[in-house]
Image (cartoon, rainbow, N blue to C red):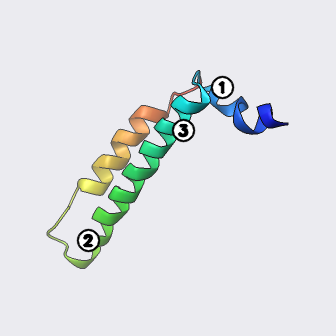
Amino acid sequence: MLTRVFLSHPRSVDESYAAHAVFAGGFALRLFLAGGAALVHALVPCLFEKTASRMIAQMYAKTHNRGS
């Protein structure tokens, strides 16, 4: 049970639990920052015009083939 919960997915992308936690935590931080940039852009449209979309594109490029 614990192996399935904590290790199955990290192994499917060839990572240890710790490496996966670091990657996912960094990803979460970048999503938070992209969301902040989008929120500021919503309020002041001349600021961060392409920041959030650029960050999302970079994150997608790092993840779309993981585990294949």
- Which amino acid does the dot numbered 2 rest on? Val
Residue 32 in the image: x percent, y percent?
40, 58
Cα distance between the residues tagged 2 and 1? 37 Å
Q: Is residue 26 above or below residue 14?
A: below
Dot 1 or dot 3: first in sequence order is 1
Q: Nearer the viewer, residue 11 or 56?
A: 11
Dot 2 or dot 1: first in sequence order is 1
Residue 14 in the image: x percent, y percent?
59, 21
Q: In the visual, does 5 lie left or right of 24?
A: right
Q: What element carries label 3?
A: helix
Q: In which quarter of the image is residue 62?
A: top left
| Label ID, residue 40 | 2
Residue 31 in the image: x percent, y percent?
41, 54
Residue visible at 33% across and 57% down in the picture: 33
Going by the picture, which residue comes out furthest to the right? Answer: 1
Dot 2 or dot 3: first in sequence order is 3
Q: In the visual, does 30 lie left or right of 4?
A: left
Q: In this view, does 62 lie above or below 55?
A: above
| Label ID, residue 21 | 3
Residue visible at 42% across and 43% down in the picture: 26
Residue visible at 32% across and 65% down in the picture: 36
Name the residue beneath numbered marker 1: 12
Position of the C terminus by quadrant: top right
Cα distance between the residues tagged 2 and 3? 29 Å
Cα distance between the residues tagged 1 and 3? 14 Å
Q: What element carries label 1?
A: helix
Q: Is mark 2 on a helix, strand or loop?
A: helix
Q: Which of 11 and 3 is in front in this view?
A: 3
